Image: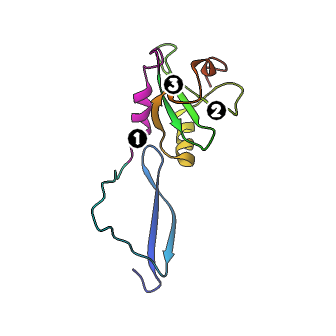
Amino acid sequence: ATEHGWPRRTERWDGQEWHETDPKLVEAPSIYASDHPTETEQTPPTLEARVDEARDTWQDEDPTVLVFDQAANPIVVAVQNPGIVYVMRYYTSQLVSCLPITQEGLRSLVWTFGVPSVRALSATPYTREDFARGEIYE
């Protein structure tokens, strides 16, 4: 604490590391302490770990995909293996076809929507056909 208030730090996870954002000086902080310890994960899974969970599943009957949740329009990222390297493509109902996305593009989505969940494609509103249209490489 300083004579002018308390520093408040806010950190944001970008899928790889924490970044300090918008530091502020708070003059009248409210302090809350839970009556019981909480079990919260201090560091979310890395974006790379989530991509690894979806990698090599596109050939499966129900592949695993990354899902950035939005109210009525989730963004789904498929990790496809057209050859030796894997290719990531994303789709949302606002697009005519799926588009390629880079690791940096994924980090941008993490900044906006948070770390994606990993789900079966059948648990999303989209199908394999939605990922069959569009460019494969960026």
In the rendered image of this protein, does residue 113 appear above or below residue 98?
below
Q: Name the residue: 49% across, 21% down.
A: 86
Q: Name the residue: 49% across, 13% down.
A: 83
From mark 1 to mark 3, how far is it between C-alphas?
A: 24 Å
Apparent side of residue 65 relative to residue 96 in the rendered image (left or right): left
From mark 2 to mark 1, how far is it between C-alphas?
A: 23 Å
Residue 59 on image: x %, y %: 47, 14
Q: Which residue is mark 3?
A: 122
Does the magenta segment cover residue 108? no
Between circles 2 and 1, the one closer to the viewer is 2
Q: Work out whether residue 60 or residue 52 is closer to the camera in this orientation and state it.
A: 60
Q: Secondary structure at mark 3?
A: helix
Q: Secondary structure at mark 1?
A: loop
In the rendered image of this protein, does residue 19 appear above or below residue 106?
below
Of mark 2 and mark 1, the one earlier in the sequence is 1
Q: Point out which mark residue 22 bears.
A: none
In this view, the residue farthest toward the bottom is 3
Q: Which residue is mark 2?
A: 92
In the rendered image of this protein, does residue 61 appear above or below residue 34?
above
Residue 67 on image: x %, y %: 52, 35
Q: Which segment did they paint magenta?
A: 44-62
Residue 52's image quarter?
Answer: top left
Residue 124 on image: x %, y %: 54, 30
Of mark 1 and mark 3, the one earlier in the sequence is 1
Q: Secondary structure at mark 2?
A: loop
Of mark 2 and mark 3, the one earlier in the sequence is 2
Q: Work out whether residue 63 or residue 115 is closer to the camera in this orientation and state it.
A: 63
In this view, the residue farthest toward the left is 37
Q: Which residue is mark 1?
A: 46
Sort mark 3 into few (<14), some (14-19) or many (20+) by Cα contacts within 10 Å: some
From mark 2 to mark 3, how far is it between C-alphas?
A: 15 Å
Q: Work out whether residue 61 or residue 89 is closer to the camera in this orientation and state it.
A: 61
